[in-house]
Amino acid sequence: MKNRMIAACMLLFSLPCIAQMAVSSAEQRAALIHSLERGRVTNVNGEQYQHLPGVLAVERQRHGQSADQLLALVGADSGAFIENKGEFVLFRSSRGWQTATLSTSGAGVVYPAVLNTRTNTIGLLLGTLEVKLNNMSNVEAIATAHSLELVKAFPHLGTVYYRVKAGSDVLDAAAVVGSDSRVVSANPEILESVQVPF
């Protein structure tokens, strides 16, 4: 009984400290988000996103690879780390790309980042476009006309996923494909939240 009382007292006294740490962490993240350079705006599925020219992401190539190891492969120091998003590591880039360009590095593909202006969540532009077509017979013709790689087609939904080439601006590609008369809509695919299994 005495041990339970001691444990309860310790918990009671530690709750304000835990709450303070959570507030401090939230304040630090808000300050970080506020400090990031902002680029152009795009709307996807009712949400507004703003390109973050100074933020990039790279995917871990093997299980257990640390953020520091991965950042070293892309030429960034450990102080550039922003956050993990599943298997992706987001970091500040000194390159300061003003375009939302998909690129490659010694660590693999480097993805541009966007900010959901409503939730302040950082998302990744995965280099794929979700395209709704007027007619599914145009799947290959759209790919050829816009130098895209067909990833997957869902004829029953009238939807196709295409990958843009490395070196392409993902937001520009979405705008150009979206203006094609054979296309109903074209949106960049954005990874904003990652489900973590139990």
Image (spheres, rainbow, N blue to C red):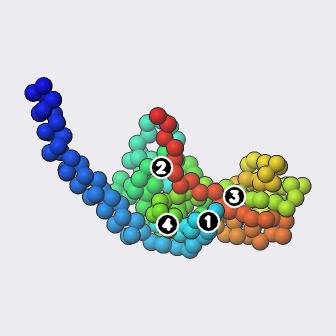
Position of residue 103 measured from the top left corner of the image (x, y, whole percent)? 59, 58
* Mark 4 secondary-structure assignment: loop
Query: Which three-letter amino acid code belongs to the residue tagged 2?
Result: Lys
Looking at the picture, does residue 26 appear above or below residue 96?
above
Check if mark 2's residue and mark 1's residue have beta carbons within 8 Å. no
Q: Earlier in the sequence, mark 3 or mark 4?
A: 4
Q: Is mark 3 on a helix, strand or loop?
A: strand
Q: Which residue is at a point 23% across and 55% down the rendered structure image?
A: 20
Q: Mark 4 points at which residue?
A: 118
Q: Is residue 129 left or right of residue 75?
A: right
Q: How many labels does the image show?
A: 4
Q: Name the residue under label 2.
A: 85
- Label 2's element? strand
Which label belongs to residue 129? 3
Compared across the picture, whether 154 is left or right of 13 comes to right
Spatial CA span between label 1 and label 3: 16 Å
Label 1: which residue?
A: 46
The quarter holding residue 183 reads bottom right
